[in-house]
């Protein structure tokens, strides 16, 4: 990578002010405020370094190709690309102003209308568990769980041993139950927690709230986020299409639209 070859790091780049020059290739310069902000869950330093490297590499190639004849087709491609950037920004502003929202009824209606597309290939269980060491009293802890309380002792244990605790009931495939060595004959739905003593001295406190069998529809719980994304995209497309129709009508009324 170019930054690494120059002996720089992302920290060096982040220490700059927005208008400071990050890189220069021949006569072209790149400043911090020209770069895109990283998205959620993205390493900001790596994101920054990648953009600078990509820009520098393009400038090196552009300088090498500076004597290539600039044809009318290339000019059209450049103009189209510029317009694409402007259009994308305009459409995002338009969508933001429209305050697109997907409510629970819309999600439920979509789910019901598309159940045939959401068929399970394996059984699923809505499952919650805590795998405890011998130092903890499972009877005391289970009494609290049935009342909906973790309690200080279990909370501290789960904080120290997050892999041993499923704090919220979650839809899982049989492999999850097998992984904690819960025997298949115990895979039954129940409204309360049950205990299973393992040979290694550990105790599993578990609850199976519901079950869906292979061939049935997938639970809405595990589809909700995807459905919201689909519906949001559809609503955004509707906004863009309506605005596009309005732009066309306006251009026609003002005699700014002709196709020969």
Image (spheres, rainbow, N blue to C red):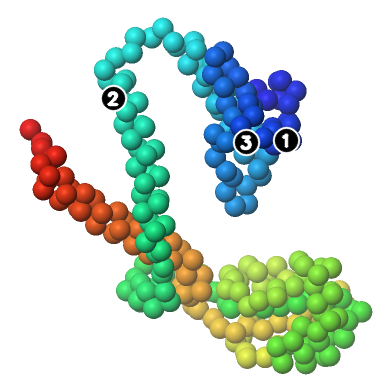
SS of the residue under disc 3: loop
Label number found at residue 15: 1
SS of the residue under disc 2: helix
In three-dimensional space, the C-alpha distance between marks 3 and 1, rounded to whole angstroms, equals 9 Å
46 in relation to 29, above or below: below
Tell whether 150 sits left or right of 112.
right
- At label 2, counting other C-alpha atoms closer than 10 Å, the crowd grade (few under 14, some 14-19, many 20 or more) is few
> Which of label 1 and label 2 is nearer to you?
1
Provide residue 22's location: percent of width, then percent of height: 64, 27
In three-dimensional space, the C-alpha distance between marks 1 and 2, rounded to whole angstroms, equals 39 Å
* Residue at figure coordinates x 76%, y 66% from the top left: 163
Tell whether 208 sits left or right of 111.
right
The reply to whether callout 2 and callout 3 are in contact (CB within 8 Å) is no
Label number found at residue 18: 3
The reply to whether callout 1 and callout 2 are in contact (CB within 8 Å) is no
**Which residue does the numbered mark 2 point to in the structure image?**
76
Dividing the picture into quadrants, the one containing residue 33 is top right
- At label 3, counting other C-alpha atoms closer than 10 Å, the crowd grade (few under 14, some 14-19, many 20 or more) is few
The reply to whether callout 3 and callout 1 are in contact (CB within 8 Å) is no
68 in relation to 172, above or below: above
In three-dimensional space, the C-alpha distance between marks 2 and 3, rounded to whole angstroms, equals 32 Å
Provide residue 149's location: percent of width, then percent of height: 74, 87
- At label 1, counting other C-alpha atoms closer than 10 Å, the crowd grade (few under 14, some 14-19, many 20 or more) is few
100 in relation to 195, above or below: above
Residue 113 visible to the viewer: yes
* Residue at figure coordinates x 84%, y 90% from the top left: 140
Provide residue 156's location: percent of width, then percent of height: 84, 75
Using the image as rendered, state which of residue 127 and residue 80 is in the foreground: 80
């Amino acid at each position: 990578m170019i930054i690494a070859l120059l002996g720089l790091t992302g920290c060096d780049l982040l220490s700059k002010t927005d208008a400071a020059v990050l890189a220069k290739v021949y006569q072209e310069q790149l400043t911090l405020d020209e770069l895109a902000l990283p998205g959620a869950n993205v390493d900001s330093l790596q994101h920054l370094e990648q953009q600078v490297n990509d820009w520098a590499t393009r400038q090196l190639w552009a300088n090498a190709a500076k004597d290539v004849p600039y044809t009318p087709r290339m000019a059209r491609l450049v103009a189209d690309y510029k317009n694409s950037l402007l259009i994308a920004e305009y459409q995002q502003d338009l969508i933001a102003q429209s305050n697109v929202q997907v409510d629970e009824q819309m999600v439920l209606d979509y789910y019901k209308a598309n159940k045939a597309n959401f068929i399970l290939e394996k059984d699923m269980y809505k499952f919650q568990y805590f795998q405890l060491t011998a130092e903890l009293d499972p009877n005391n802890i289970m009494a609290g769980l049935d009342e909906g309380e973790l309690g200080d002792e279990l909370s501290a244990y789960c904080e120290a041993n997050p892999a041993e605790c499923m704090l919220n009931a979650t839809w899982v495939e049989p492999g999850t139950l097998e992984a904690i060595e819960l025997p298949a004959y115990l895979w039954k739905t129940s409204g309360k927690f049950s205990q299973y003593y393992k040979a290694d001295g550990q105790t599993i406190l578990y609850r199976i709230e519901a079950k869906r069998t292979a061939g049935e529809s997938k639970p809405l719980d595990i589809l909700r986020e995807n459905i919201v994304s689909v519906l949001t995209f559809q609503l955004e497309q509707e906004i863009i299409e309506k605005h596009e129709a309005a732009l066309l009508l306006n251009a026609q009324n003002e005699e700014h639209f002709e196709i020969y």
